[in-house]
Amino acid sequence: MSTLEQLANPSLVASTLGIVALGVALNHWSKRTGLRPNEPVLLPGGLPLVGHAFEYTRDPSALYARVRDFARDLQPISVTMMGQRIYVIMKPQDISTVWKTKELSFDAIVEWGLNTIFTMSPDAVQRLHLDAEDGTGSMYVNSHTFFRDHLAPGRPLELITSGFVEYMMKDIEAFKQKLREVPGGKLQVDLMHWIRQRVGIPSTNAMAGEGLLQYDEGILDAVAQFDKDMFRLSSGLPKWINKGAHDNVRRLSDAFAHGLEGEKSIYWVEKRMKMMADRGISPRDQTTAMMSLWQALQANAIPMTFWMMYQLLRNPDTLQELMQEAKPSLDSNGNLVDIEYLSTKTPKLNAFYWEVLRYASGNTSVRQVLETVSIGGRTLYKGAMVMLPSRPYHMDPEIFGDDCDKFVPDRFLRDGKEPGKLNPGIRSVRAFGGGNTLCPGRHFATNEIFSAVVTIFNTFDISLVDPSQSVCPRTDGSTVSTLPPNKVVLADIKLKEGK
Ligand code: HEM
């Protein structure tokens, strides 16, 4: 097996958005091994040619932990993958500087991903740079403000949230009916798969209209597979080597080409497609670009909802307490009527949610160095990549306490005065990134996760099939974002009395 084939082996696939760095590395092979003046110190232990690539693909979290231990004062550290230099930045002040530094480009990464991973044509990827008659300029540059504005609290957020809740209630009704029809009124489910349907169906319909799932009802499973295939896809290897992964992307892209109708989707999908049409981008490429946005919509919200529900099932007293706290958001029939109440007036639910975000986030922001710059007293050279992994930060005992590797439901409620039991506050959690790429979907994500969790627990009695099973985030597998569970979790579901 060649090195590239070994790297493409599914058992070696990497596990965060930082996978993109490796993908870019594989596509920009170079032989540089020596350090340049004042370049961040190289992490020892890299292999000839491949550098730290195997270690990274085996377990990115373990590599980051090694980087953190080696750096000690958290200075930037170099790793190499297939000859590509990658700087790992960990110090909070340096991360803030990276987010503000225009020489460190996010757009270059997006451009590469749209073509290599999502299969948008090279012509369309270039056309996104063009201006149109409306004077909105490059679609890479305007995307940050576009999504921030169209997902902002106020009318835009209300619109997508109400669409989600409406579809969620329909879906819950359909599932209630299904339960009524099964013998014993009880079903055993793979909890992650079940949640993928409960959150994915309404969010897909709210964003893209009903046509997508009508065209292909399997797209939610296909996007879960897509997340697992991310490394294979980002490797840029010939399509025949990764045929299954490419066929799956094709399936998703076909569903978008045939099932997405601009005028039946949320207004900003149509608007974005019109902006692309104005730049001469073909309908197929327009729908492919929308597919990449839909993937961002699904990739984190679904596993985060899983972790919320799983941890609540593991902590029944907290579940009762949080449901009690959420009660004013429901009407006398138990229907969710006040979502704003959930996001703004429930300190315990919010604290629990931010602990879930901290505990399960596997996000790694990636940037490309467009011009040589100085960060954290070190010189970052043009052409290299920069990685900002959230996990080593979220697992830092000096910031979050000695129990940082555990899920602690009330971490962000405790007084933080007891030695080793710190509480740096929810603002210290970095699951949504930062700077001008700070996740614009975070308000909607919070609304959908809270409304799904409260409605589900208010409607169904759910119990873990094996309450003694210990499940934690899988750090050695493949995902693009939030870490999935390391085991399949089975749950029994039945209707609550009176529902
Ligand atoms: C709990 C759920 C979510 C998490 C943890 C999350 C996380 C993130 C992170 C870390 C980034 C920054 C990437 C970087 O700087 O490298 C990001 C960007 C983004 N997210 Fe989210 N996200 C979530 C939900 C959503 C949802 C529901 C949507 C869509 C409605 C969305 C749309 C986006 C978009 C469009 C960007 C790119 C922003 C830009 O380029 O300026 N996200 N997300």
Image (spheres, helix red, strand yellow):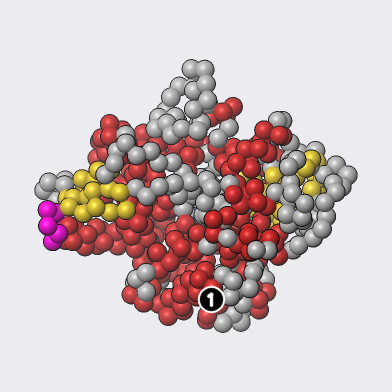
The answer to whether 212 is drawn above or below residue 406 in the figure is: below
Q: Could you tell me which residue is drawn at 58 percent across and 46 percent down?
A: 59
**Placement of the N terminus among the 4 image quadrants:** bottom right
Look at the image and give the residue range highlighted in magenta.
180-185
The answer to whether 250 is drawn above or below residue 144 in the figure is: below
Q: Could you tell me which residue is drawn at 56 percent across and 82 percent down?
A: 282
Q: Could you tell me which residue is drawn at 40 percent across and 30 percent down?
A: 410
Q: Could you tell me which residue is drawn at 44 percent across and 29 percent down?
A: 411
Q: Where residue 470 appears, x then y in whole percent?
A: 38, 38
Number of numbered labels in the structure image: 1
Residue 82 found in image quarter: bottom right
Report the amino acid beneath label 1.
Gln
Q: Is residue 213 magenta?
A: no
Q: In this view, does 310 lie to the left or right of 472?
A: left
Query: Would you name the residue on which mark 1 appears?
Result: 286
Q: Where residue 391 appears, x then y in whole percent?
A: 56, 41
Q: Is mark 1 on a helix, strand or loop?
A: helix
Q: In this view, does 298 lie to the left or right of 240?
A: left
Q: Is residue 305 left or right of residue 269?
A: left
Q: Main secondary structure of the magenta part?
A: helix
In this orientation, does residue 451 appear?
A: no
Q: Where residue 222 appears, x then y in whole percent?
A: 43, 66
In this orientation, does residue 5 appear?
A: yes
The answer to whether 284 is drawn above or below residue 399 in the figure is: below
Q: Is residue 223 left or right of residue 98?
A: left
Residue 214 found in image quarter: bottom left
